[in-house]
Amino acid sequence: MSESDTVVHSKYTTVNIPVKLFVRIEKVIERNQDFKTVTDYVTFVLREIVMAHGTANSEDCFNSEDLKQLKIRLEALGAM
């Protein structure tokens, strides 16, 4: 059974992230309270990225400025 088969049979799946990143996301949530859980936050971020990729007409879904801003945000969260 492949990883994608597992997802089809279940509503959710598990994705591992570094503990340090998890803790930083918790702090972001505490400060702005736009999200209730780390899962909500991560789901939102991933959904935005996937939607941006899916609606792009070119092979590069992000321009250089988009990539720069994404890198800054990820660094602020401790992901890089």
Image: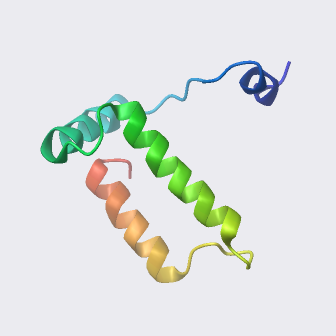
Q: Is residue 58 above or below residue 28?
A: below
Q: How is the image coloured?
A: rainbow
> Which residue is drawn at the image coordinates 47% and 75% (left, top)?
66
Residue 68 x %, y %: 42, 74
Name the quadrant of the N terminus: top right
The outermost residue toward the right is 1
> Which residue is drawn at the image coordinates 38% and 48% (left, top)?
79
Q: Nearer the viewer, residue 79 or 13?
A: 13
Q: Nearer the viewer, residue 22 or 51?
A: 51
> Which residue is drawn at the image coordinates 55% and 81% (left, top)?
63
Residue 42 quadrant: top left
Residue 34 x %, y %: 26, 45
> Which residue is drawn at the image coordinates 54% and 50% (left, top)?
47
Q: Nearer the viewer, residue 19 or 51?
A: 51
Residue 73 x %, y %: 33, 60
Residue 26 quadrant: top left
Residue 61 quadrant: bottom right
Describe residue 47's horizontal placement relative to residue 7 as left or right.
Answer: left
> How many labels, in total?
0
Residue 32 x %, y %: 17, 48
Describe residue 51's horizontal placement relative to residue 74 as left or right.
Answer: right
